[in-house]
Amino acid sequence: MTTKDFAVFDADSHVVEPPALWEKYLEPDYRTLGRHALWRQKGRTGAYLKINGEIFRDTGNPNLPRHALWRPGMTWDAIGELDPHTSHPITEGASDPQARLADMDAMGVDQTLMYPTWFAEGFFLVRDPDVAYALALAYNDWIADFCKTGPNRLFAAAILPCRTWTSHWRNCSGSRPCRRSVQSSSGLCLSKTTI
């Protein structure tokens, strides 16, 4: 870790949710519905986001992953010099907690607060409240496990499906997704989704 006489806290960091997250953490009864309600897929010629069965094409260059291209030590000039005709991989630290900790060490970052990326782009549009609830549980369980790798360094914003909240769930202790996040050492911040 870089030598310094102060702590560095990155308050706006992001993870990129791997497709395997949904296979491992999404309850089996919701996997098919979840793929219909909110799904991101990288294809041969581009990336696609499916929301409520409707497909949206990511119009960015699929060779330059806009969410996770930056690596420790890169400069803006280095990013600009990347060949857009060559496929560049996503930074490992975007989805792997050990790699994230190594990236933080290389940048001199002591702690970080992480937010979802692709999941956050479409989650608030999911119409089915039961599926939204299941998706939130899956994401929150995954990010809690991610943060367990560095419990004093990695922290995350939980995602709450506010469409499923009834009046008696307004208190955080009554909501299963919220309770899971707060009980884990990583649940510092709550991110509500409402329409």
Image (cartoon, grey):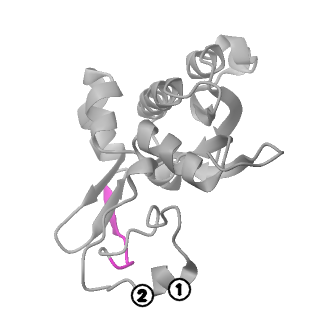
- Residue type at mark 1 is Asp
Say whether marks 1 and 2 touch (CB < 8 Å): yes
Can residue 26 be seen by looking at this rendering? no
Give the CA separation, mark 1 to mark 2.
6 Å
Q: Residue at 25% of width from left, 22% of height from top?
A: 28
Position of 113 compared to 94: left or right?
right
Image quadrant occupied by the N terminus: top right
Task: Name the image quarter holding residue 189.
Answer: top right
Residue 84 visible in image: yes
Q: Nearer the viewer, residue 49 or 4?
A: 4
Residue position marked by numbered label 1 in the rendering: 77
Magenta highlight on residue 60: yes
Q: Is residue 126 left or right of residue 5?
A: left
The reply to whether the magenta stretch includes residue 20 is no
What residue type is disc 2 on?
Glu
Provide the residue span drawn in magenta: 54-61
Q: Residue at x 49, y 32 (%)?
A: 143
How many numbered marks, from 0 up? Answer: 2
Specify few, some or many for label 2: CA neighbours under 10 Å numbering under 14, 14-19, or 20 or more.
few
Between 73 and 173, the one nearer to me in the picture: 73
At a point 42% along the width and 28% down the height, the residue shown is: 138
Check disc 2 and report the residue beneath it: 81
Q: Give the side of residue 44 with respect to residue 56, left or right.
A: left
